[in-house]
Every structure is written in C-alpha cells, then in structure tokens.
Amino acid sequence: MEPSVMDLRHFQHGSLPGGFRQMLIDVHADAYADQMDDPFHQRFAWFVDHWTGMDGFSCVVAYDGEEPVGFAYGAPLAPGREWWRSTEYKPGEDRSSTYAVSEVMVRPGWRKQGISERLHEALLTERTEDVAVLLVDVTHPKVQELYESWGYVKAGEQQPFADSPVYAVMVKEL
C-alpha cells in the first residue's frame, strides 16, 4: 500500500523552526496516547530538549498535507560515549563512528503504510557515520523484527534509566 504522506521534511540542529519542539511532543502524545500515564513517557519533552540540543541532531518529519504524521530523529554519539559498545557486538576496527537513532514514531492513523521505514531511510541516507544504533523495548518483539528486516542485529540489552523499560540494543553497519 502506498503511504498517503506527500512530504518528508529534513531539520537539523541550529535551524529548527518555531513550534518544532511542541510538534514533536504532540506527535508523541498521539502515538503513545495509551501509555501517557507512564512517568517515563511523560518525560518525553526532556528527551526532545536533550536530543535537539546535540550537535549533529537531525530529524525527518513526515507530513500529510500540513499535518505532521510521524518523525525519526537522532544524533551522532561522541567518541568514547558510545553506550552500545558494552554489548557483545564488535564492528570492524575501521567502524568507529556512531549515529544514534533516538526516535522513530508514526501516529496511529497513518501506521502500517511503510511510513516508519521511509522516515528511517531518509534519516540515515546522508549519514557519514559507520554504525547506527537504536533501542527497542524488549516487550515488543515485532518491532525488533521490523528493525532486523531493516538490517539491524540485536547486540545486547540495556536499561538506560531506572524507570525505563529494558531495551534490546540494535546495531546496523552503515
């Protein structure tokens, strides 16, 4: 099925338009409406501020007309602060730089149309890092399988915050 999204727009650290932060928060609230009583999901605005403030932050937002329907974002990890390296996955010695995919989400009314894959591909297409890494809640095996179909491998598990889920650490060589 061809997605209804007409427009993928790219954004970067240092040139984010007014209202961008609130747009991300609003899409998240819709995408996770059934989980907004969870304190971890209630802290999403903190994560938005953290990631959008990072050098190298990039984001792709899918729009259906002028309606934002989903997004994917992340940023390069600083050398020596690549939290995934404590896992069993060991890339080749020449694979040293990492791009962390922090979020890929699509609002419920636009799911199952291939939008998340298009967002993910558009986010990574111009990356120069050697490795992409992301986290998937271990209680969502179908999401993990989706990322595996996009070339990721499970490298281990981590719980980055005391109130966060346990995540599968997924790594993909770029």
Image: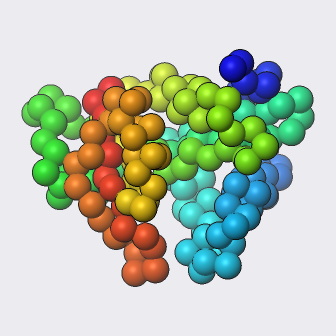
Which x, y percent locates residue 98? Answer: 32, 41
The N terminus lies in quadrant? top right
**Where 141 falls versus 94 (above or below)?**
below
**Where 13 falls versus 7 (above or below)?**
below
Residue 19 seen in the figure: yes
List the single residue furthest toward the right: 66
Taking 9 as reference, is 135 left or right? left
**Where 51 falls versus 107 (above or below)?**
below
Residue sitting at x 69%, y 39%: 111
Which x, y percent locates residue 81? Answer: 28, 57
Which x, y percent locates residue 75? Answer: 47, 45
Taking 157 as reference, is 67 left or right? right
List the single residue furthest toward the left: 93
Name the foreground residue: 135 vs 123. Answer: 135
Name the foreground residue: 47 vs 17. Answer: 47
How many discs mark residues in the rendered view? 0
Residue 129 seen in the figure: no
Residue sitting at x 18%, y 55%: 87
Residue sitting at x 61%, y 70%: 41
Name the foreground residue: 27 vs 110. Answer: 110
Taking 163 as reference, is 119 left or right? right
Residue sitting at x 40%, y 51%: 141
Taking 158 as reference, is 161 left or right? right
**Where 148 falls versus 48 (above or below)?**
above
Which x, y percent locates residue 170? Answer: 32, 46
Q: Quadrant of residue 119?
A: top right
List the single residue furthest toward the top: 2
Q: Quadrant of residue 167?
A: bottom left
The C terminus lies in quadrant? top left
Name the foreground residue: 34 vs 168. Answer: 34
Way the structure is coloured: rainbow
